[in-house]
Amino acid sequence: AQSVTQLGSHVSVSEGALVLLRCNYSSSVPPYLFWYVQYPNQGLQLLLKYTTGATLVKGINGFEAEFKKSETSFHLTKPSAHMSDAAEYFCAVYSGNTPLVFGKGTRLSVIA
Amino acid sequence: SQTIHQWPATLVQPVGSPLSLECTVEGTSNPNLYWYRQAAGRGLQLLFYSVGIGQISSEVPQNLSASRPQDRQFILSSKKLLLSDSGFYLCAWSALVAGGYGYTFGSGTRLTVV
């Protein structure tokens, strides 16, 4: 069975500071990994995804994530936070033949 | 390109009333289809998924049901809504596309049961 653990339900950073949102997964087969962002009262928007190949994945809005198989991690980073990055972020794992499994989400607050 | 349509965007329904939420997908054939629910302040819970017409798997037993009458149509229903059914409902599809599996969400329906 697959599972996702997002460490920290709420992360707060200052504007301009590094954003680091942690995600660890469990999967019995090579996983596809995703990060989604949800702004207030909106649906989910795909930030980036890892399927195969390069382990450092670049996404939209300056975010990137690195797939580390040895650590079963897929942490999301952004060098410099903007106020517009304040949102809920979800990590998810998918093996292709089972539904997408989400972590519980991390709410990112950006302080001016 | 693949698109997903979900409606209505918002819905306010009294307790005990029926529910029908519809989701349609364009630009892909034989997708896997999913219904998720997000309760206030909580994560995303998988409710139903379907790998083909008439094939529905239920993840959480409750007073909701799902149907897939056509390849690219997925419907979430209830005969009698409960207050606890309030939440944000998201439809999604997945299929093998160029670059790997695509997994796309609709814009969601915010349901308030009063």
Image (tube, coloured by chain):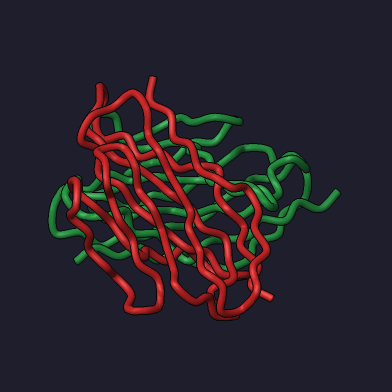
Chain colours: A green, B red
The N terminus of chain B lies in which quarter of the figure? top left
Percent x, y for residue B24?
40, 38
Vertical side of B2 occupied by B75: above or below:
below
Residue toward you, B10 or A46: B10
Residue toward you, B81 or B1: B81
Image side of residue B110 versus residue A57, left or right: right
Residue sitting at x 30%, y 65%: A3
Percent x, y for residue B38?
52, 64
Figure label count: 0
- Single out the residue that lies furthest toward the left: A29
Residue toward you, A52 or A18: A52
Percent x, y for residue B84?
55, 79
Image side of residue A106 versus residue B93, left or right: right
- Single out the residue that lies furthest toward the right: A112
Percent x, y for residue A16?
75, 40
Vertical side of A21 occupied by A6: above or below:
below
Residue sitting at x 56%, y 79%: B16
The C terminus of chain B lies in which quarter of the figure? bottom right
Residue sitting at x 39%, y 46%: B92
Residue sitting at x 45%, y 48%: B22
